[in-house]
Amino acid sequence: MPPLFTADFWQETVRNATEWGLQVLPGILLILLIALIVTKVINRVLNRVSGFITANLKRTGRIDPGELEKRVKTLTGILSAATHVFLWLVIAMLILRRLGLDVAPIIAGAGIVGLAVGFGSQELVKDFIAGFFILMENHIRVGDVAVINGISGGVEQVGLRTIVLRNSSGVVHVFQNGKINSLANMTKEWSAVVFDIGVAYKEDIDEVAKTMRSVAADLRQDGTLGPEITDDLEVLGVDSFGDSAVIIKARLKTKPARQWAVGREYRRRLKYAFDEAGIEIPFPHRTVLCHHK
């Protein structure tokens, strides 16, 4: 039996490898180089377009700059991902053709497989449809703070299939769009902090409300947090009668996602103002009676 790896075999192998390296490999490398260049061009064009749209809409003054930035960033991310997927599919087909493979049967087979997968992955289709309507109706954007299915966090990614939240502890939550039962956006267009202020029953409610408005007016003059407040304090009135306090409800509107910082500073200042005005903030007391025999 003649040996398999003869001198002629090795010569033929080297000749074929050389021909492939000289004729096929340069074409593949050229395709990859063009793909990288096109990718960079697409990224630059998308950045330019988003910057142009943002600049022109900012001039109109009809959309808040923060809201506009969130919307453009979200839509640009979706468009960039879709464009890159399409581009690399085309590149893969070109490389296969360069390798001498007939891509027509591959495309046909992919269509059949895709159809079969489509029938078996109705949940995936549901996610994409739900994601499309979420984006089209502008319910949520990257940078928002939202509550999804009872879990709150900052929106880090909005896609056609999933939405990604990161909570204050750094935990990342991923939600399938088709399984989102409730979605609350806490930072769309404007935000607000609601106060439930408890004061003693003996206090003059009108004087308390006056003090609350005065503190809010002073806070609006603050160089740091003042610009974050968009309207005067709304004292909604007596909300309830508690066991030891009268609850007065008030609301302060702020720019998106600034309600927490504004609320903390307002409460700090209100405590000092109540102390200075002699307004009592009641708290539960416990009296222990001791009987001595």
Image (spheres, helix red, strand yellow):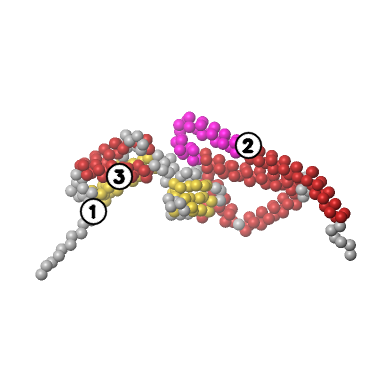
Circle 1 Cα neighbour tier, 10 Å, few/some/many (<14 / 14–19 / ≥20) = few
Dominant secondary structure (helix, strand or loop) of the stretch shown in magenta: helix
Q: Is residue 130 visible?
A: no
Disc 1: which residue: 283
Give me the C-alpha separation between circle 1 and circle 3: 16 Å
On screen, 190 above or below 178? Answer: above
Question: Percent from the top left, x then y, of residue 92?
Answer: 70, 47
| Residue at the limit of the structure toward the front, as seen here | 7
Q: Is residue 265 visible?
A: yes
Q: As drawn, is 131 to the left or to the right of 105?
A: left
Q: Residue at x 73, y 44 (%)?
A: 28
Circle 2 Cα neighbour tier, 10 Å, few/some/many (<14 / 14–19 / ≥20) = few
The type of residue carrying mark 1 is: Phe
Q: SS of the residue at dot 1? A: loop
Disc 3: which residue: 267
| Snapshot quadrant of residue 7 | bottom right
Residue 213 within the magenta-colored segment of the rendering: no
Q: Residue at x 59, y 36 (%)?
A: 44
Whether pointer 1 and pointer 2 mark residues with C-beta atoms closer than 8 Å, the reply is: no
Q: Which residues are magenta?
A: 42-71
Question: Percent from the top left, x then y, of residue 144?
Answer: 46, 45
Q: As drawn, is 192 to the left or to the right of 277?
A: right
The type of residue carrying mark 3 is: Arg
Instruction: Compare marks 1 and 2 and give the one earlier in the sequence.
Output: 2
Disc 2: which residue: 41
| Residue at the limit of the structure toward the left, as seen here | 293
Instruction: Compare marks 3 and 2 and give the one earlier in the sequence.
Output: 2
Q: Residue at x 23, y 49 (%)?
A: 281
Give me the C-alpha separation between circle 1 and circle 2: 64 Å
Instruction: Compare marks 1 and 3 and give the one earlier in the sequence.
Output: 3
